[in-house]
Image (tube, grey):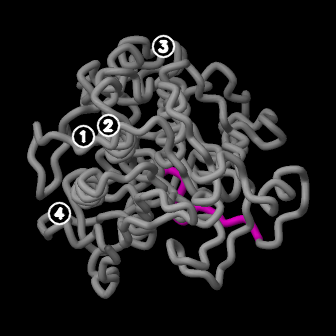
């Protein structure tokens, strides 16, 4: 079904108690995400808590250097810089980031620091919820605008879901949509993530779980890995494939059975804007040997996640963890390359009969191979359209449920 988009702008102002500012905790072996653990205090620079709220320039520098030593994924590779050479905290923070090459790019191109007041507005602009108390189901009109059953040229029943954002309310909508696809007896599913830059990880977890079947329940969806000083958090941060709702929104309570398609393969439409939590869906399914046929362009390449830490009016988002699948794979900083490389047509409506990505997926569903144009593109023919870019800020793409530190 096509869902009305007239409420989209209302949706951008909606929210939840699961705000980005509340990205704490890891997960539990039962599939949860909230664990009351934290990093140990820095032995080298002193506990960051002892410098918190000292808003002199010198005090803020001491806080930042200590906090980075405590939480940063690559704390032991932070370059030695002279703090006295910096007259503002933003430049000092960026000077501490690890910039050694990784697949031709700086290793850390995602950590951020910005005014606390900017976090809320940036989340609203990117489509994430930003204030509590309103009905979050409205947000799903933007996050999941289209769900329908289409027929391939050879008559296969294929479920198509356009999934644009892992924002609160999307899980409820996806559950309803997957129920309809399950009841329609679809033989394949196409998950359109080409515009999806990520968001809450629990939504990726439940989405991947609904593509699979009961046999996947309890298998590793994603293992979060913190730095080597934070072993207890890493050990407590295994997110599993689910059979029931673990993190309820407004419509489906805890324990609601997830509708599972029990499919051995999934088609995923991607672009350079497909990032973070969206990449978790691809990686996690491959980790349990579900065939993922990726159609479109390469993804953004972000296996990392953040917590937010506020101090003296600034919000800090250093990379703190990397996510890996059940096979231990999480090294995709250059992005996932498509099975069928297809150039999108900006003039075409996603999910309609003139959508080149959907048509390529349907062709593959019938024939088990990419269409001829896709094969040419895969072999090195140049792309005809610019690569899409993520719409969410990088620190807002892979969020955990929990309390702010």
**Cα gap from disc 3 to disc 4, whole angstroms:** 35 Å
- The answer to whether residue 92 shows anywhere in this view is no
SS for callout 2: loop
Q: Are marks 4 and 2 in contact (CB under 8 Å)?
A: no
**Cα gap from disc 1 to disc 3, whole angstroms:** 21 Å
Q: Which residue is mark 1?
A: 403
Q: Which residue shows up at 79% across the image and 33% down it?
A: 100
Q: Which residue is mark 2?
A: 24
Q: Which residue is mark 4?
A: 132
- Sequence order check, earlier mark of 1 and 3: 3
Q: Which mark is residue 372?
A: none
Q: Position of residue 273 (x, y in %)?
A: 60, 60
**Cα gap from disc 2 to disc 1, whole angstroms:** 5 Å
Q: Which residue is mark 3?
A: 229
Q: Are marks 2 and 1 in contact (CB under 8 Å)?
A: yes
Q: Which residue shows up at 29% across the image and 65% down it?
A: 130
């Amino acid at each position: 079904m096509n869902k009305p988009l007239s409420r989209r702008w209302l949706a951008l102002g909606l929210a939840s108690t699961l705000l980005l500012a509340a990205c704490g905790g890891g997960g539990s072996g039962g599939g949860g995400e909230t664990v009351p653990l934290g990093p140990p205090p820095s032995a080298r620079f002193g506990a960051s808590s002892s410098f918190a709220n000292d808003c002199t320039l010198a005090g803020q520098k001491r806080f930042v250097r200590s906090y980075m030593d405590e939480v940063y994924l690559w704390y032991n590779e932070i370059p030695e810089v002279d703090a006295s050479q910096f007259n503002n905290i933003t430049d000092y923070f960026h000077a501490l980031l690890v910039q050694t090459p990784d697949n031709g790019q700086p290793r850390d191109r995602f950590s951020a620091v910005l005014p606390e007041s900017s976090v809320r507005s940036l989340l609203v602009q990117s489509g994430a919820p930003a204030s509590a108390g309103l009905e979050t189901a409205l947000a799903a009109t933007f996050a999941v605008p289209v769900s329908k059953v289409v027929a391939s040229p050879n008559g296969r029943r294929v479920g198509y879901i356009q999934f644009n954002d892992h924002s609160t309310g999307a899980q409820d909508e996806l559950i309803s949509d997957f129920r309809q696809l399950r009841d329609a007896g679809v033989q394949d599913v196409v998950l359109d993530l080409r515009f999806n830059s990520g968001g809450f990880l629990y939504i990726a977890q439940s989405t991947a779980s609904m593509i699979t079947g009961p046999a996947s329940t309890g298998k590793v969806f994603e293992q979060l890995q913190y730095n080597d000083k934070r072993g207890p958090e890493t050990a407590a941060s295994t997110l599993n494939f689910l059979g029931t709702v673990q993190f309820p929104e407004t419509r489906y309570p805890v324990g609601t059975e997830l509708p599972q398609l029990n499919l051995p393969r999934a088609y995923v439409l991607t672009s350079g804007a497909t990032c973070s939590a969206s990449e978790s869906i691809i990686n996690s399914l491959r980790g349990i040997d579900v065939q993922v046929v990726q159609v479109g362009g390469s993804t953004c390449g972000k296996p990392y996640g953040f917590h937010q830490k506020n101090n003296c009016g600034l919000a800090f988002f250093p990379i703190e963890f990397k996510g890996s699948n059940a096979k231990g794979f999480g090294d995709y900083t250059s992005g996932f390359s498509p099975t069928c490389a297809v150039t999108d047509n900006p003039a075409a409506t996603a999910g309609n009969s003139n959508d080149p990505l959907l048509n390529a997926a349907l062709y593959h569903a019938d024939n088990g191979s990419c269409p001829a144009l896709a094969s040419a593109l895969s072999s090195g023919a140049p792309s005809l359209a610019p690569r899409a870019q993520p719409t969410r800020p990088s620190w807002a793409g892979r969020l955990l449920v929990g309390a702010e530190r």
